[in-house]
Image (cartoon, helix red, strand yellow):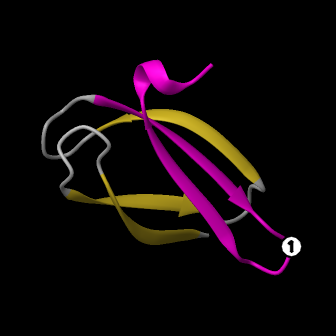
């Protein structure tokens, strides 16, 4: 199931839409900002109770 969430781009600061696949507990992928087109690393952790933690990082901030 997909759930729409909103967060702020770590580059331009604009609010963007992120789709969460709630069937997966952990996700890590790169998605371009829909405003400035720069690559954002998306980190998602979904807990068993359905609570989610979403983190957007600049491409070079990920180790």
Q: Give the residues drawn in magenta, as a range.
A: 39-63
Q: Residue furthest right?
A: 48
Residue 61 location (% of width, % of height): 49, 25
Residue at the image position 62 percent from the left and 37 percent from the top: 28
Q: Position of residue 9 (x, y in %)?
A: 29, 48
Q: Residue at x 63, y 19 (%)?
A: 63
Give the total of numbered labels. Answer: 1
In the rendered image, the vertical position of residue 63 relative to residue 28, given as above or below: above
Q: List x then y, in percent, for residue 31.
A: 38, 36
When asked about the image quadrant of residue 58, the answer is top left
Residue sitting at x 20%, y 46%: 34
Please, what is the dominant secondary structure of the magenta stretch?
strand
In magenta stretch: residue 46: yes
Horizontal side of 24 relative to 2 (left or right) equals: right
Q: Quadrant of the N terminus?
A: bottom right
Which residue, as the protein is rendered here, is positioned at the far bottom?
49
Q: Quadrant of residue 10?
A: top left
Can you tell which quarter of the image residue 6 is in? Answer: bottom left
State whether residue 30 is above or below residue 60: below
Q: Which residue is mark 1?
A: 48
Residue 60, image x, y percentages: 44, 18
Crowd band around label 1 with a 10 angstrom C-alpha radius: few (<14), some (14–19), many (20+): few
Give the left or right position of residue 53, taking residue 2 as reference.
Answer: right
Q: Is 37 situated left or right of 21 in this image?
A: left
Relative to 6, say whether 13 is above or below. above
Badge 1 marks a residue whose secondary structure is loop
Q: Nearer the viewer, residue 52 or 24?
A: 52
């Amino acid at each position: 199931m997909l759930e729409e969430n909103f967060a702020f781009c770590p580059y331009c600061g604009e609010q963007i839409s992120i789709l969460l696949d709630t069937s997966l507990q952990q996700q890590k992928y790169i998605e371009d900002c829909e405003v400035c087109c720069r690559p954002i690393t998306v980190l998602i952790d979904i807990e068993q109770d359905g609570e989610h933690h979403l983190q957007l990082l600049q491409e070079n901030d990920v180790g």
